[in-house]
Image: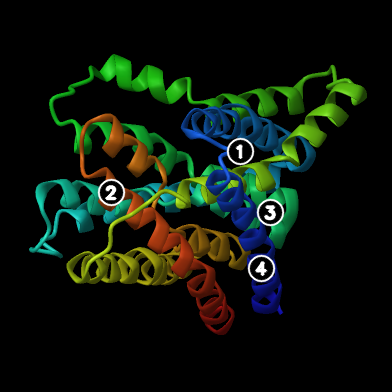
Amino acid sequence: MMTLTLLNLQVTLLTYMGIGVVLSKTGMIRDGDQRFLSELVLNVLLPISVFVSFVENISFSLLKSLAGVLFAAILLETLIYLFTKLPLQKDLTPGQRSVVRYSYLVSNGGLIGTPVIEGLYGSVGVMICNVFLIPTRILAFAAGESLFNPEIHKSKKAICYSILTNKVIVAIALALLASVSPVAVPVPVFTALKAVGKCLSPFSLIVIGSLLAQKITWDRGIMKKLAILCFYRLFGIAFAALFLCKGIGLDAQCTTIATLLLGMPAGSTGAIFAKKYGGDSMFAAAAVFVTTIVSTGSLVILMAVIERVL
């Protein structure tokens, strides 16, 4: 059963995150180290993992499926964007509203979702996962700057450039070129890339654990707001994705991956943007912390529902 597999996988992921918490609490990972490790995961390990998974598994039939996955991802992100325009929580401060909107738009599908999907579906899952996350990764930076610093106005040219130079999109393009090139990637080089790509899961989860170790001030008002955020982020959006993907005829594997990715916790980049632009960084950190902890159980529930529906 996939639910039992996911439950066992969650224990493994929690162990990795626990290591990150311990390393942060003991001072072995400091603020500067967190920044370096985050850059290493997002700009090196993730693109290499994507490149390897595409080169190993690419085929014409899979490309047709991936086109459907990308269409579903764009459609779902558009609907989520419209959803964030609704006055769902009227008691939020302006700073908290930016955090909540960002949390709905951007899940932590890259750092937490990728290890989960890899554990369930292997390298094929990683490939599907990263195609689905293309709109999310674009929004992670575009929405981050527009929500937390509305004074920034980028030109269309600058926006297109940032999209085309996204590390994951570049990795996908290089993998597609490698798959049609008459010259194969040298075996020793590809072996090294595979070994580096396998570091993605433990490193990304250790980084998340170190981020969760920071001090947060709690009160009843904050907990109520975070409970509503958890409900929509971990269940509402995910269930909507499940029935929409099923409705448009996406296959069971792609539907499961899309649903799980949209049931992931709030994107940790929200806390980074809030801190960078003087937003409510404490509430942003609390949102990442609570949704991450709750997601260890909610994903198992979500998988059980998926198995019944599909």
Q: CA distance from mark 3 to mark 4?
A: 15 Å
Amino acid found under the numbered disc labelled 3: Glu
Q: Nearer the viewer, mark 3 or mark 1?
A: 1
| CA distance for labels 4 and 1 | 23 Å
Using residue 129 as the reference point, say whether residue 157 is left or right of it.
left
Q: Where, quadrant-wise, is the C terminus in this rendering?
A: bottom right
Residue placed under numbered mark 3 in the picture: 118
Tell me whether the residue at label 3 lies in contact with that at label 2, contact meaning CB atoms closer than 8 angstroms: no
Q: Earlier in the sequence, mark 2 or mark 1?
A: 1
Dot 2 alpha-carbon crowd within 10 angstroms: few under 14, some 14 to 19, many 20 or more: some
The amino acid type of the residue labelled 1 equals: Met
- Mark whose residue sits in front, 4 or 1: 1
Quadrant of the snapshot with the N terminus: bottom right
Q: Nearer the viewer, residue 86 or 26?
A: 26
Q: Earlier in the sequence, mark 2 or mark 4?
A: 4
- Where residue 11 is drawn, which disc sits there? 4
Report the residue that reaches farthest toward the bottom: 308
Q: Is residue 15 left or right of residue 56?
A: left
Q: Amino acid at mark 4?
A: Val
Residue at 35% across, 63% down? 233
Q: CA distance from mark 2 to mark 1?
A: 22 Å
Q: What is the crowding at mark 4: few (fewer than 14 residues within 10 Å), some, or many (at least 20)? A: few
- The image quadrant that residue 10 belongs to is bottom right
Point out the frontmost of discs 2 and 4: 2
Residue hosting label 1: 28
* C-alpha span from label 2 to label 4: 27 Å
**Crowd rating for badge 1 (residues with CA inside 10 Å; few <14, some 14–19, many 20+):** few
Image position, residue 275 (x, y; %): 29, 35
Horizontal side of 238 relative to 55 (left or right) equals: left
Residue 250 visible in rendering? no
